[in-house]
Amino acid sequence: MNVHDSERLSGLLEDAGYVRATGDTDPDVVVFNTCAVRENADNRLYGNLGHLRPAKQENPGMQIAVGGCLAQKDRGEIVRRAPWVDVVFGTHNIGSLPTLLERARHNEEAEVEILESLDVFPSTLPARRESAYSGWVSVSVGCNNTCTFCIVPSLRGKEKDRRPGDVLAEVRALVSEGVSEVTLLGQNVNAYGVEFGDRYAFGKLLRACGEIEGLERVRFTSPHPRDFTDDVIEAMAETPNVCHQLHMPLQSGSDSVLKSMRRSYRSERYLDIVRKVRRAMPDAAITTDIIVGFPGETEQDFEDTLDVVRESRFSNAFTFQYSKRAGTPAAEMEGQLPKEVVQQRYERLVELQNEISWELNTELVGSEVELLVAEGEGRKNTETRRLSGRARDGRLVHFAPGDDVDEIRPGDVVHTVVTRAAPHYLIADDGLRSHRRTVAGDRWEVGQRPKTSGVSLGLPSFGEPATETTTEQGCAC
């Protein structure tokens, strides 16, 4: 979501007349879009601002702007600690950036604008997309959950859903620009529709994406186990372009820790969803997030997490050591664990997950995979001249293109056979079964990236619009 917000900021600045600085020029404007989920985000921001101070002193006309979650949290503290910053804006008013930059230049003083609620829905703003072949599409912003470890709801606000027609219009706009893969984004995507009274809206949205010609892959992140309904599993299994990939945060396998986290589900509920997904899609790759060392976590609690990991057999897990965030209930809880205990548990979890990931990847050796050739995914090997791509289940595959290396572009589609496995990627060294050139590859080759205007249509609905029976005009709001 932060990456997508940055695309919005780029689109806004371009519309305001700014041009992206090339590598050999000094920029006139530097924008930091920040995260606040973990404590090291604070340290990184203020460290980077410190590195920019000499450049600002040499070129006082250069402007520095800080936005995003950390700006929403720290507000005027940023200018106090780094008085050479010109603009601070929050998560609810990213559309104000060009105006704030102009105002700061005119007034010759820092502009700090932090709104407490959404100014405009971010997707109504223009976006300069970074990828020629894969696009992010927000279905909602904000979060209605109250997880005790998470600072996001206080910084992003309550969940606001987009109209289905708006979402689908943006997807179609991306496909018309050559994009073949979209990822639907939301802090809790499967709660989508609650705001306009349709708890099955997300499954309908997946099916509607399946009707868009030219859209080859649909992904989504992240669902919450509390809101996961069977119709979403059915839509995943029955809609050909929806990838059999599911990223569903577990956070802990201990029921007592889940209760302390206010996660509103228990381990058996989570495992039941995993079993249903596997029955409907045996080839599904399931990934997760896990926090180790939450306040009060006992050795038995941690063992319960390991048990759920063993049964779930995740293809990958994003594992985190608990990070205390000021302003969250967990930061004030008793039972904060010593660093050495958390580190030891973290290492045990990583070892187990790497073992499972390697076993699952090894099972794929000898199988054929379809890859969307990627840009910047892993490193090319100078001896094998390997390229990289993502399989439909999200796995990263490094493949040897053989004599066709100069003909294959990011965005193209290739078929190849897996020859070797590692915990975090697959290797395919026996050449290609096929290579399909795509419009996305053509556009990547000439350096063209999609630019989408903001989309805002009308009332929530799916399918064809109703037949007009009157000539009166409404406000369409």
Image (tube, rainbow, N blue to C red):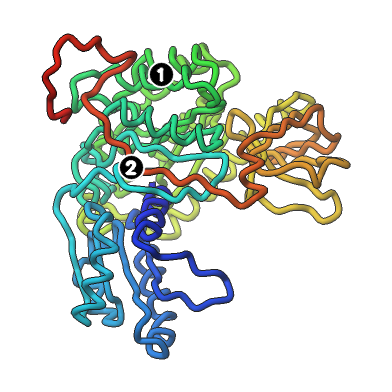
Q: Position of residue 101 (x, y in %)?
A: 28, 70
Q: Image point 18% across, 79% down: which residue?
A: 107
Q: Is residue 111 left or right of residue 272?
A: left
Q: For mark 2, what is the residue?
A: 454
Single out the residue that lies furthest toward the front.
471
Q: Position of residue 12 (x, y in %)?
A: 35, 56
**Which amino acid type is shown beneath numbered disc 1?**
Ala
The relative height of residue 307 versus residue 59 in the rendered view (above or below) is above
The relative height of residue 45 versus residue 158 in the rendered view (above or below) is below
Q: Is residue 80 left or right of residue 31?
A: left
Question: Would residue 411 be seen by someone viewing this image from the given angle?
Answer: yes
Q: Image point 71% across, 27% down: which residue?
A: 369
Q: Position of residue 63 (x, y in %)?
A: 34, 76
> Which marked residue is nearer to the observer: mark 1 or mark 2?
2
Q: For mark 1, what is the residue?
A: 208
Tell me the quarter of the picture where residue 455 sits: top left
Q: Is residue 340 left or right of residue 313?
A: left
Assess whether mark 2 and mark 1 are in contact (beta carbons under 8 angstroms): no
| First reached walking from the N terminus: tag 1 or tag 2 | 1
Q: Position of residue 5 (x, y in %)?
A: 37, 51
Residue nearest the viewer, comparing 151 with 255: 151
Q: Image point 18% across, 64% down: which residue?
A: 113
Question: Would residue 272 be seen by someone viewing this image from the given angle?
Answer: no
Residue nearest the viewer, comparing 190 with 171: 171
Q: Quadrant of the C terminus?
A: top left
- Label 1 SS: helix
The relative height of residue 159 versus residue 236 in the rendered view (above or below) is below
**Which amino acid type is shown beneath numbered disc 2?**
Gly
